[in-house]
Image (spheres, grey):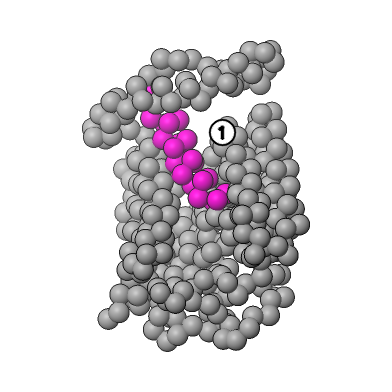
Amino acid sequence: MDANVFLPAITAALAIIFFFLLLDQWRLRRRAYQAIWALGILFFGIAVACEAIAAAFGWNERIYLLWYLTGAVWTAGWLGLGNAFLLGRTRFGFAFALCLFLAGLFTFLTARANPEIYESAATTAMLYFLVALVLALAIAVETYFQNWRWPWLAFVGVAGATVLSIVLVAMAQLPEPGYSLDPETGVPTAELLPPELRLLTPFMNVTGAFALILGAMFSAYVFMPKKRLLNYNIDPNQPGDQFLFNLLIAPVAIVVNFVFSLPGALKALFTGKINSRVPATLLIAIGAFIPAVTDSLNRFGSTEWFQLGKLFSVLFLLAGFLVSTEIMSEIRVPFTDKVLWARRTEAREATES
């Protein structure tokens, strides 16, 4: 069987299984991040399924548009939004604000660097940047004042971009044959799509991918055993000059403390004494990073690596979610009471309560 059919079919099947596991966890625990991640994984599975179907039977306009929306626009943004809700009661809001700002800036610079493509959407690119800037500032302010509702501001940005993309697709009139493929690799491209829609891709992908990777690094740092060689304090109630000084030295202190904490963290990891979030979030970061590498290989004609990257990505993401006790306390047949596996600590806590 052609690898370009087999690999995305396997990846899509794993993603759908993953979706039902997350949806079942949300049904039991009602955590917003579980529902949002389930939605992101569903979008990923649909996009990869479109690639498998198209590789087997050929592309058409409906498959092409569905693939672009779910894969190129929605997946990364919604997965990154899940991290925002998971870490919503922490100062990760500052990092998410940075992700939004960088996404808006990159979107604007993309339009400026490619005037032959985006000349008609120059105003739209500026508008996307301004929206990202306003949301980033609002999230940073809410995080500073420890208002833990800031993830809902992030939700407004991601959901708004999602709705806008649907509207733009509904208005798009594509020339025949209704899809565009790279002549060398056969992978679909966005050349036929309106520039306003194409600019939503960096907006959502930069936000989501950075939020996944930075969220993993943030969680690993927070929950790993640490040696604090350099102390800092970003309590908003301290005098302004002290807060500004601590804010400036915080990045340096975090890096130094992280490096000197690694030996102890590795020892705790191999002895099974580390918080499950640390290995979980590192696996999630790897899963988010792999497609960036393999997508680059696709430009050189290696479509097999392009599809293998997606398969490995969903495997690492699934492993990360399964390792975390906070996300997956047990595995059961979805939507039933039949438990296939449960963590001992969770079972003990349930017994004691």
Q: Residue at x 58, y 83 (%)?
A: 178
Q: Residue at x 46, y 57 (%)?
A: 22
Residue 127 shows in this picture: yes
Q: Which part of the image, by quadrant, shows the C terminus?
A: top left
The x and y percentages for residue 230 are: 45, 15
Residue 20 shows in this picture: no
| Residue 163 occupies quadrant | bottom right
Residue 147 is inside the magenta segment: no
Q: Where are the magenta residues, as a range? A: 206-226
Q: From the viewer's perspective, is 231 left or right of 138?
A: left
The x and y percentages for residue 221 are: 43, 31
Q: Residue furthest left?
A: 271
Please say if 86 is above or below 201.
above
Mark 1 lies on a secondary structure that is: loop
Given the image, on which type of amino acid does mark 1 rest? Thr
Q: Residue at x 48, y 61 (%)?
A: 41
The x and y percentages for residue 275 are: 37, 34
The x and y percentages for residue 248 are: 58, 21
Q: Nearer the viewer, residue 53 or 189?
A: 189
| Residue 318 occupies quadrant | bottom left
Q: Nearer the viewer, residue 281 or 34?
A: 281
The number of numbered discs placed on residues in the rendered structure image is 1
Residue under label 1, please give it: 90
Q: Residues within 10 Å of mark 1 (few under 14, many from 20)?
A: some
Residue 224 is inside the magenta segment: yes
Q: Residue at x 27, y 81 (%)?
A: 1
Q: Nearer the viewer, residue 157 or 31?
A: 157
Question: Looking at the magenta stretch, what is its main secondary structure?
Answer: helix
